[in-house]
Image: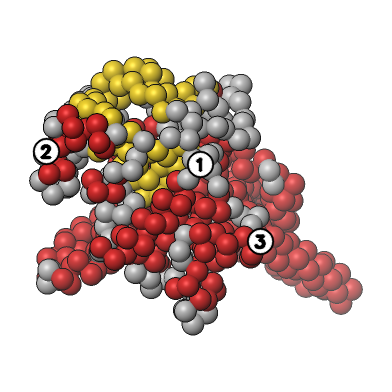
Amino acid sequence: MERGRFYLLRRMTPYFMKHKGILLFDLFCAGLTTASEMILPIMLRKVTNLGIRDIGALTGTFILKLAIFYLILKVIDISASYFMASIGHIMGAKIETNMRSDIYRHLQEQSNSFFDEAKIGHIMSRITNDLFEVTEFAHHCPEEYFIGLLKIIVSFLILVRMNTLLTVLIFLMIPIMVVMATFFRRRMRRAQANQRKQIGNLNASIEDSLTGIRIVKSFANEDMERNKFERENRHFLNIKKDYYKSMAGFVTVTKVFDGFMYFILLVLGAVFMMQGKIQPGDMIAYAMYVSMLLATVKRIVEFTEQFQRGMTGIERFDEIMRLKTEIKDRPGAKAVSRLHGEIVFDKVNFHYKNDDVPVLKNFSLHIPQGKNIAIVGPSGSGKTTICNLIPRFYDVTDGRILVDGHDVRDLTLKSLRDNIGIVQQDIYLFSGSIRDNIAYGRQDATPEEVEEAAKLAGAYDFIMALPQGFDTYVGERGVMLSGGQKQRISIARVFLKNPPVLILDEATSALDNRSEQIVQESVELLSEGRTTLTIAHRLTTVRDADEIIVMNDGGIVERGNHETLMAAKGAYYDLYTKGGMLTF
């Protein structure tokens, strides 16, 4: 639902208050520049009327005083303008920076269910493009409207003393013009909001296509991706057309009233001058003030586009900030230093957000400290969900999960996750060096500790064979490395973290046989002395587990060690004898 303009301005108030000293001084400078500009017509009026009445009164002393006064005004005007253009803009940039920090922090607090549905391209657009507009908005919005209001009020008070009727007729044009322009302003805002939304779609489309460019090329689907992009691109063009048509209507309204105001001044001013109701100097002052008013209105019109962009950016910022954080620390949550690793699932039920189909149903499981438990089952049986619930990537729908007797919801998220190491099938390496990626497991690790972790993960030899060794750049998402190399680096950073609880989520299923063998040796070494949950695709990798849990349809269908399950000749036996792959 679109939020009201006053709500959005109130939303910005805390950010302005952080820099209220700069803001107030900026408005003070705006007042000085406005005063400097508005005194000039009075000075010219005085000189003109004085010259017409008595040319001898224009002495050298009088002109010198006038010149010095004008120069002083210009010095004040230039100094104030410098501050407004520099420090005032920096204030806007600081507000933008504060907002970007807040939205990034808030996004980090969102649960996995948010990122399951969100498009990263849209999120990136809100963090970057939308907030770019806030810098100009935060600086110019209070400044432009303050200057405009000041000029209108002061001009009216000065001109009404010269000729009331002419002043009232000219100033009547302003509210009528504003009313008539409102329709176009609303259309501009709607079009601007659609434009922001579509640029997010466009960014998401580009990111999706370019990230998967190797798949696109392998299927020779460049034409299909190009057509998808062109559809989004043309839609964006149509939205911009609507916006610019609305803006053209807005500008036309101001042009029409521009003509009306000068027409009134030209005709009535000449009539009043003929009747002696207005002096020639007054006519000059009127012309300059009308010109000033029109310039002010035009400036506000030009600023309206920027205003709309800024308001849209604030609205989209607010949409993110109003998202409720589903996974967060409970009041009084306990921070633990080192857990032992006993895990209990107590009658756990779970279904994903916006999906009432249960993934786990009354699920109970006890995992003693230091035991290696393997979980096998077909896709959708709930095995990955089990591992996601322990570190609270999601929260249980019903029931509870205990670690060392503590409900995981009663522990702080940081301390809970500090005690859990995860090695996943989908390895993510950050853009940077190999050393940076291993040290991600513990940021205060020494170079020697990083190298030792690499040795334990079986990664040291291949790293040292690279041109820059540990300082080798891995590329975006580790594209410069093979799957086995990336997996060993991900294992090394868990070695460095040294957690008491280890979750292996199909850590070797995407590797070739040789890489799987090397990585499996590292995984076995990593598992020693830790409570380990292993989700396996190849059953040959879980033969040595202390207990194997066979899952299907959100529950346990069999459990026991390899020998017990083979002797029972049940579901596990059937799977193992048919090739050891999960195909049921």
- Residue 70 at x, y percent in the picture: 78, 68
Q: Badge 3 local density, few (<14 within 10 Å), some, or many (20+)?
A: few
Q: Badge 1 local density, few (<14 within 10 Å), some, or many (20+)?
A: few
Colour basis: secondary structure
The answer to whether residue 240 shows anywhere in this view is no
Q: Amino acid at mark 1?
A: Gly
Quadrant housing residue 345: top left
**Number of marks:** 3
Determine the secondary structure under disc 3. Answer: loop
Q: Residue furthest right?
A: 61
Task: Give the mark nearest the N terminus, 3 or 2.
Answer: 3
- Residue 442 at x, y percent in the picture: 59, 52
Residue hosting label 3: 446
Give the alpha-carbon distance from disc 3 to disc 1, as whole Å: 24 Å
Q: Which mark is residue 574?
A: 2
- Residue 552 at x, y percent in the picture: 19, 30
Q: Amino acid at mark 3?
A: Thr
Taking the spot 47% from the left edge, 79% from the top edge, the residue there is 465
Residue hosting label 1: 529
Nearer the observer, 566 or 435:
566
Q: Where, quadrant-wise, is the N terminus in this rendering?
A: top left
Relative side of 307 to 216, left or right: right
Task: Give the mark nearest the N terminus, 3 or 1.
Answer: 3
Determine the secondary structure under disc 1. Answer: loop
Taking the spot 19% from the left edge, 66% from the top edge, the residue there is 215
Give the alpha-carbon distance from disc 1 to disc 2, as whole Å: 31 Å
Task: Give the mark nearest the N terminus, 1 or 2.
Answer: 1
Q: Which mark is residue 379?
A: none
Taking the spot 43% from the left edge, 35% from the top edge, the residue there is 371
The answer to whether residue 435 shows anywhere in this view is yes
- Residue 42 at x, y percent in the picture: 70, 59
Q: Amino acid at mark 2?
A: Asp
